[in-house]
Image: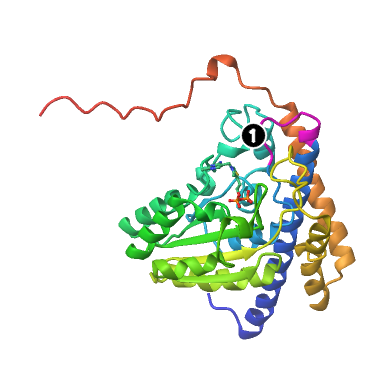
Amino acid sequence: MSQPEGARTAAEPAARIEQELQLYYWMKLVRAFEERVSRLHRQNKIFGGVYSGAGQEAIVAGICASLRDGDFVAPLHRDLGVFLVRGVDAGRLMAQLMGKETGLSRGKDSFLHGGDLEHGIFGSTSMLGSSLPIAVGAALKFRMKRENNIAVAFFGEGASSRGDVHEAMNFAGVHKLPVLFVCENNRYAYSTPLEKQMAIEDVADRAQAYGFKGHTVSGNDLLAVLEVTERAVARIRKGEGPALIECKTYRYRGHSEHDAALYRDQEELIEWQSRDPIPRYELFLEKKGHDVKHIREQIDERAQKVVQEAVDFAERSALPKAEEALEDLTAPSPAPAPKGK
Ligand SMILES: Cc1ncc(C[n+]2csc(CCOP(=O)(O)OP(=O)(O)O)c2C)c(N)n1
């Protein structure tokens, strides 16, 4: 049934306000979850490496906000936030990090390889750059089955110099596949600074060589990420082929929790912290007329509650049984072919 004109225009701003606050909540939830994970790691409660994405929240929130159910994401080791923004249960995610049987891969391996296909997330792989061929494979499947979905591959600027990355982009460019490449350029590949691992300034420039558009955007500006992503995703869904978005950003913590990041200048860190994506977005909300102090209190409380409940759930969960260790290593065998002709 069609709505009267007045009701429709009243509903539109309400939906927009809801989206503005949802984006803020996502960034806050991801930050709170990751801060807690770093703490739990120091308490020896997390198995395996922890690769904090603190400082990079606007990228996962801005990119994932433009996706739909059915789209496919291949995150990298620093993209724990992708799981939360795509709606994976925070308790199962925390259980995964703690190696518990209620985790995404029943407590086998750390967060690194635990995907969640129900939410369209492939577990990240250990080989840098391999998220791209995986996403390109998914995009090829969408094309072959005429499904109007897109695939997204996240990768770092360090990975962007690997062969897999170039082969995947070339194949996607030739076949005009529905895939979005997202480079999270945080200036360091472990301890190697940008200028020591590539001879150009912008990873986005590489897209041109493969026949599609490259965009450079501030990865600390949620609205900018959102805007460029929405445009790129609309073009990809129309069948216009891939796009590359390079988000310039900075990671606050070391490469992983055992890395004190002594190779970088303290001043540089402070300068980037002054461009933090969260207060930057709060300023926007304030200018739009929101009562930011009130919203911040409410949302912080909500995020902390989700994180605490996730920790409680994971702590209560059992470790997997030793006899299950060899289960799920291979895909189930196909059913035997029917006998007869
Ligand atoms: C092929 C390969 N080489 C080296 C490594 C070790 N390694 C893991 S992460 C990393 C740095 C990655 O840097 P970047 O791609 O910029 O992503 P970031 O960690 O900065 O987000 C390295 C060298 C690896 N996992 N795979």
Is residue 147 at all visible to an observer of this figure? no
Residue that mark 1 sits on:
96
Q: Secondary structure at mark 1?
A: helix
Q: Amino acid at mark 1?
A: Gln
Q: Characterize the local packing of mark 1: few (<14), some (14-19) or many (20 or more) Cα atoms within 10 angstroms.
A: many
Residue 293, magenta (yes or no): no
| Residue 90 visible at all | yes
Locate residue 2: give its quadrant: bottom right
Question: What's the magenta bit mostly, secondary-structure-wise?
Answer: loop
Q: Position of residue 95 (x, y in %)?
A: 67, 33
Residue in the picture at 55% in, 53% down: 155
Which residue is painted at 58% across and 72% down in the image?
228
How far across and down, in percent of the image, does residue 227 sit?
61, 73
* Residue drawn 81% across the image and 31% down it: 43
Within 8 Å of ligand 1, the CB of disc 1? no
Scheme by which the image is coloured = rainbow
Q: Nearer the viewer, residue 202 or 25?
A: 202
Which percent across, then down, holds residue 30? 72, 51
Residue 14 vertical position relative to residue 182 in the rendered view, above or below: below
Q: Which residues are magenta?
A: 40-50
Front-most of residues 289 and 211: 211
